């Protein structure tokens, strides 16, 4: 039986809904497995998609690894949570590089009470950093406005 998925071009793989087909493609060494992991995140349960997303995070092709992290973020958006293994994989990479958007999606779409401790600290740190940046900007603009007002009087 011929596969209905175009592994060479990657076309249509966002619609893949069969984890066994992904596994077979992985064994064959097919291309576009990260793209297909996104499809699994959309089409399958988190428990079915998670092991494939984790494997795709280890692919040698950087772009396909990036798509695997996109799949993790997609899973967080759609399910309101991740498996312990996906949380651990994102934590191992940290809030940078390929995992940055996936971590941000997790922090955005998973309720705070359901986050593991590292993610809770990331969310708190992110909010504190954002608040400090807001305050810094406000002070900067206030000083600039005061300086302009003072200079305006001298002219």
Image: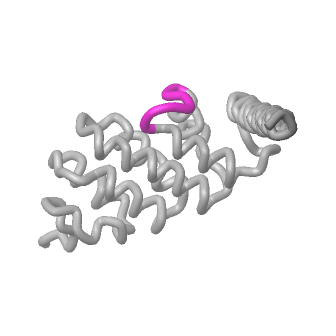
Give residue 13's quadrant in the image.
bottom left
Q: Which stretch appears magenta?
A: 92-98
Residue in front for this viewpoint, 30 or 130: 130
Name the residue: 57% across, 29% down. 91
Q: Look at the image and name its color scheme.
A: one colour
Residue in front for this viewpoint, 8 or 142: 142
Vertical comparison of 79 with 148: above or below: below
Residue in front for this viewpoint, 5 or 73: 73
Picture coordinates of residue 152, whole percent (x, y) = 81, 40
Picture coordinates of residue 30, whole percent (x, y) = 17, 51
Residue 80 visible within the image? yes
Picture coordinates of residue 20, whole percent (x, y) = 32, 58
Q: Is residue 96 magenta?
A: yes
> Quick check: 118 left or right of 145?
left
Name the residue: 43% across, 38% down. 98
Q: Which quadrant of the rendered structure holds the N terminus?
A: bottom left
Name the residue: 37% across, 59% down. 19
Q: Is residue 142 magenta?
A: no
> Quick check: 106 left or right of 117?
left
Please state the total of marks drawn on the protein image: 0
> Quick check: 105 left or right of 110?
left
Vertical comparison of 50 with 91: above or below: below
> Quick check: 68 left or right of 9?
right
Residue in front for this viewpoint, 145 or 56: 145
Name the residue: 53% across, 61% down. 45
In the image, farthest residue toward the front? 155
Give residue 86's quadrant in the image.
top right
Picture coordinates of residue 16, whole percent (x, y) = 34, 67
């Amino acid at each position: 039986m011929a596969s209905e998925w175009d592994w060479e071009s990657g076309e249509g793989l966002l619609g893949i809904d069969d984890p066994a087909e992904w596994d077979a493609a992985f064994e064959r060494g097919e291309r576009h497995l990260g793209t297909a992991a996104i499809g699994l995140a959309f089409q399958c349960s988190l428990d079915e998609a998670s092991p494939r997303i984790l494997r795709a995070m280890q692919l040698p092709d950087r772009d396909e690894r990036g798509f695997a992290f996109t799949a993790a973020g997609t899973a967080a958006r759609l399910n309101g949570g991740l498996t312990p293994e996906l949380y651990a994989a994102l934590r191992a990479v940290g809030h940078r590089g390929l995992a940055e958007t996936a971590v941000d999606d997790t922090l955005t779409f998973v309720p705070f009470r359901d986050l593991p401790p590292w993610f809770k600290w990331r969310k708190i740190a992110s909010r504190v950093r954002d608040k400090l940046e807001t305050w810094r900007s406000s002070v900067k603009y206030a000083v600039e406005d005061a300086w302009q007002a003072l200079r305006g009087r001298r002219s």
